[in-house]
Amino acid sequence: MGDWRFGRIDVVRAWRELADARVNYSADEVRQPSWNIDTYRTVLPSERPGPPEPGGSWEHARRLVRDYQFSPPEIVRALYDPTTPLLGRDMLLEARFHGMHFYCGVRVTEVVDETRDTTDRTWGWAYETLEGHLERGKATYEVVKRQNTGQVQFVVSCYSQGAPTLDRITSLGWRLFGRRTQLRFYRRCGERLRGFVEAALRDGHPGLGPPASVGHLVCAPSDARMRRLDALAVRRVAPGRATGHAVGAGPPAS
């Protein structure tokens, strides 16, 4: 069953198939220059020094990061089961660029909830790419409060490279547009989260409605919308697998 947010594919089936997929790389392989290693920091509204304040910037940011609301829907959307524990959760991502929509799996393999260096109150999580993904690598999203100063940050840390199993056309597209889109994704994540936290502190809520659903799964972020040209997009499921297949343009399935 598909919908206007995910197009003409059976997204529930594609999500279910992630359960049998494995992480598609080994951390021992990660080294520059063949891998991109990135860290992006966004300063969020600050708090008073000390532990995170109830209803403050850190708490709002933590909730938004937990629910993947920071992701820019024009670049990446996600489908997942919100009733499952965060650690171990499978997510079907829809990566969108230049008239192509790629459906790729990731798995949450780490949840962070700690105080570092006696001052940095940190909460976050990380996912790693599964077989069939466009990329290989890991992305970590953390909300950090420096309790000695009150500064709050959103930190995105990633290492990645294009999957070596992409077909010729997809590989060419990734080389031309992938890195540029990746860097724009990091920047937009920080911009969105800062805007949502500012709205939550000002209005009491970030201005996001309830998420759309496909069966028992939810679509994140909640403000994802169908654009008219989306009906013309070419869609590819598990593009990093030899068995990945394209789905042509047309109206979404009901």
Image (spheres, helix red, strand yellow):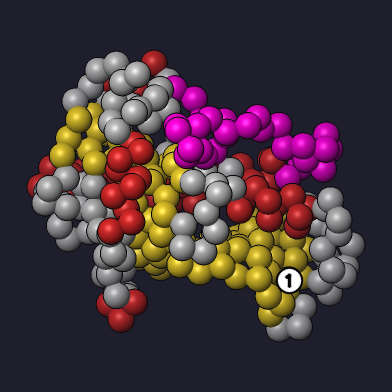
Answer left or right for 42 relative to 119: left
Name the foreground residue: 11 vs 27. Answer: 11
In this view of the protein, which residue sits in the foreground, 24 or 116? 24
Q: Position of residue 80 (x, y in %)?
A: 46, 45
Q: Is residue 110 above or below residue 11?
A: below
Q: Quadrant of the C terminus?
A: top left
Disc 1 crowd rating (10 Å Cα; few below 14, some 14-19, many 20+) is: many
Question: What residue type is disc 1 on?
Answer: Arg
Q: Residue at x 28, y 31 (%)?
A: 9
Identity of the residue drawn at 29% across and 16% down: 251
Residue stretch rendered in magenta on the structure? 197-226
Residue 179 rendering spot, x and y as whole percentages: 34, 52
Q: Is residue 216 magenta?
A: yes
Q: Is residue 19 above or below residue 210?
A: below
Task: Tell me if I can see residue 148 in this picture.
Answer: yes
Q: Is residue 73 magenta?
A: no
Q: Is residue 249 left or right of residue 50?
A: left
Quadrant of the image containing the N terminus? top left
Q: Count of labels shown?
A: 1
Determine if residue 95 is in view.
no
Is residue 249 depicted above or below 196 in this figure? above
Q: Which residue is mark 1?
A: 121
Q: Secondary structure at mark 1?
A: strand
Q: Position of residue 19 (x, y in %)?
A: 33, 56
Quadrant of residue 7 within the rendered picture: top left
